[in-house]
Amino acid sequence: MQYTFQELETLRDFYAGQLLNDTVPFWFPRSFDREHGGFLLMRDADGQLLDDDKAVWIQGRATWLLSTLYNTVMPNPEWLEGARLGYEFLINHCFDTDGRMFFHVARNGAPIRKRRYFFSETFAVIAMAAYARATANEQAAQRARDLFGRCIEYATTPGLLEPKFEPTRPARGIGVPMIMLNTAQQLRDTIGDPRCDALIGQWIDEIGTYFVKDDIRCVMEQVAPDGSIIDHIDGRTLNPGHAIEGAWFILHEALHRHHDARLIRLGCKMLDYMWERGWDEEYGGILYFRDVYNRPVQEYWQDMKFWWPHNEAIIATLLASLVTGDPKYARWHKQVHEYSYTHFHDAQNGEWYGYLHRDGSIAQTAKGNLFKGPFHLPRQEWYCMQMLNNYLQKNSVWSGVSHC
Amino acid sequence: MQYTFQELETLRDFYAGQLLNDTVPFWFPRSFDREHGGFLLMRDADGQLLDDDKAVWIQGRATWLLSTLYNTVMPNPEWLEGARLGYEFLINHCFDTDGRMFFHVARNGAPIRKRRYFFSETFAVIAMAAYARATANEQAAQRARDLFGRCIEYATTPGLLEPKFEPTRPARGIGVPMIMLNTAQQLRDTIGDPRCDALIGQWIDEIGTYFVKDDIRCVMEQVAPDGSIIDHIDGRTLNPGHAIEGAWFILHEALHRHHDARLIRLGCKMLDYMWERGWDEEYGGILYFRDVYNRPVQEYWQDMKFWWPHNEAIIATLLASLVTGDPKYARWHKQVHEYSYTHFHDAQNGEWYGYLHRDGSIAQTAKGNLFKGPFHLPRQEWYCMQMLNNYLQKNSVWSGVSHC
């Protein structure tokens, strides 16, 4: 199938309406913490606060979202106020004395937990960069660039962060090149950074070289340093939603690079391979984990349906459809879009549930917790709205394939 | 209801038959690793090996099981051979140079992962102690006592092990007094240790004082140092199966202490409270996590049914029934026994599946992985068989309540 111009307009209006009338109002302004700064985001389905602790990932992501909406949708002073609360909380309370960031802090910023990973830092980079753009605040921009530099060090200096595993069986994960790729894209799109283009190219090459397996049509989540498959439970575990997120980061880069054909091919095959592995033909939706050889994985909840792989798949399929005109991508987009807005969306209270059983029934009702908050869903609705606006305005530059 | 004498005999024969003809033969001797020592336990439903890595918890637990069967059921030389393979693998490959144990090693013993917790150590204590009893090996007994001494240090010396959380919100968990209580009971029952009786009393007092909440009929999984409830997501999370396991450790101690009435009351109320919180009235079975105030918990898979809480509840309800004669315990025992052997047991291949969706359907088929192996199920079948043998032989000392 192909989407008609009119269908694309309808989709654009749908995403814009969901973003601005359903998703964003669920969170803001009620989550602004005007007393301690930052946001109170751990909320039940109806918005009731479950916990006043603050997950640092989500504080950064919410700051990014509000700044980005301010920068790209409209200069709403309420969004800017929220972005300032988030930015100041991040810089005042979320850094340890060694320059690393915490993972989880109390409402007043007292530290609860710090982890080995540097994802708090990458989300803070995009938050600071988008906030710097919104406020033309050069200090915030410099902080974003400095912290991005530290992330590069963490990503490239073995042993700098405490490892989780002994050195017996070295591995490389797709998570680091993926998060760094997207962080660099955000930095470039907001405040610019001369390091970004070359680094983005390197991280995409790392993904294509080591993780994408054409012979078995698969994107691995981790591999040995030489790219070979580690034939143990953890090494065999695939995360289709994550790889599909990586696919659209690369398709986004392909557009930025004037429809770079190599990157379009890479992004599309990552999407193809992991749609085949992740889409649940029996119940619909995207399965969370799969084993590369279809054996049982370690995680017992592997067949649940989480909200975020669906957000990433909605972006990836729509982007692939617009870039290539291949009718299967419009078909997949329609499938995942319909499954998601039918099963995850809470029509009564707004926003999405996060966690469904395999059969699509709701497993738990929290809208926000240590890992879920205003990020994947509003980013999807925002990105699709922007992408469709852009496409509808100047579709001729998007693809050589007919599309009406 | 009450079980009749004849029904108890039937139950005893059932557990003995399951243990010796279904559960143990699933694992042994095929899991003996005669090349590298230890056991190859990460197996799919049909016994096919999923991974030749070795989880140190499970290596210790399997060694304990084989030694215990040898000590208490019959002197089967095959079990002793397996116990020796396990014991030697533990002492030769599972300790780091700092005296701590690994969590996960490769088939040849090369270390993969070490964790902050000392559960590998507690399972090694019971393995070494049971093996020492089986072989009258004084060196193994001394190793067990020494390692138990180190566990006491880890359990009682703040800061000796790297903490997971910052000191902002100190907490105490029920896991440490529970595991130490059971480790000491095993040590006492196999090789004896003069430290055990007093320590067992202290750990039971810690559980009763800090974690058991009569006003809300609940056993907390963690609390503040003074026993107050930490009103955040993690602090509110209950683990009914775990608390029910603690209940039977305490009932076991009550029997050891000549039917100590205070301990019987404590164990029974822990079982009562957490049966009320954990039993799923809609689908049957025991829910994995609950929130103390019935709010959403952090874990999205909280409503799954795992094998081991059912093993612990089968022991606890049968023990409470025999000790008190209260008909509700026989009723509960019948409920959880029937649910479990209907839903978890794999009649075709033997042993139990580990992970069911809330509705009782199978979520994944592995019989063994990093956390599941030959422990909770065979321990339940062995313990119930022994308990029933003991009761049927001399039931008059068990309870003042009529029971036929």
Image (cartoon, coloured by chain):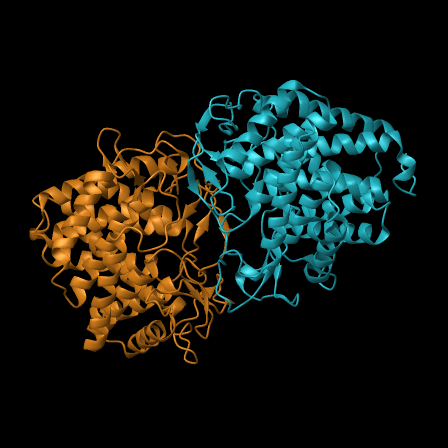
Chain colours: A cyan, B orange
Quadrant into which the N terminus of chain A falls:
top right
Most extreme residue toward the front is: A139
Residue visible at 27% across and 41% down?
B332
Q: Is residue B376 left or right of residue A267?
A: left
Which one is nearer the viewer's eye here, A46 or B312?
Answer: A46
- Total labels: the figure holds 0
Q: Is residue A5 left or right of residue B70?
A: right
Which one is nearer the viewer's eye here, A276 or A352?
Answer: A352
In the displayed structure, would residue B78 be above or below residue A6? below
Question: Residue A184, position in %: x, y?
Answer: 70, 45
Question: Residue A282, position in %: x, y?
Answer: 63, 45
* Residue B183 sits in quarter: bottom left
Question: Residue B239, position in %: x, y?
Answer: 35, 42
Residue B10 visible? The answer is no
Residue visible at 73% across and 54% down?
A204
* Residue B278 sits in quarter: top left
Residue A193 visible? The answer is yes
In the displayed structure, would residue A109 be above or below residue B59? above
Quadrant into which the C terminus of chain A falls:
top right
Which one is nearer the viewer's eye here, A199 or A317?
Answer: A199
Residue visible at 72% across and 36% down?
A190
Most extreme residue toward the bottom is: B35
Question: Residue B95, position in %: x, y?
Answer: 36, 69
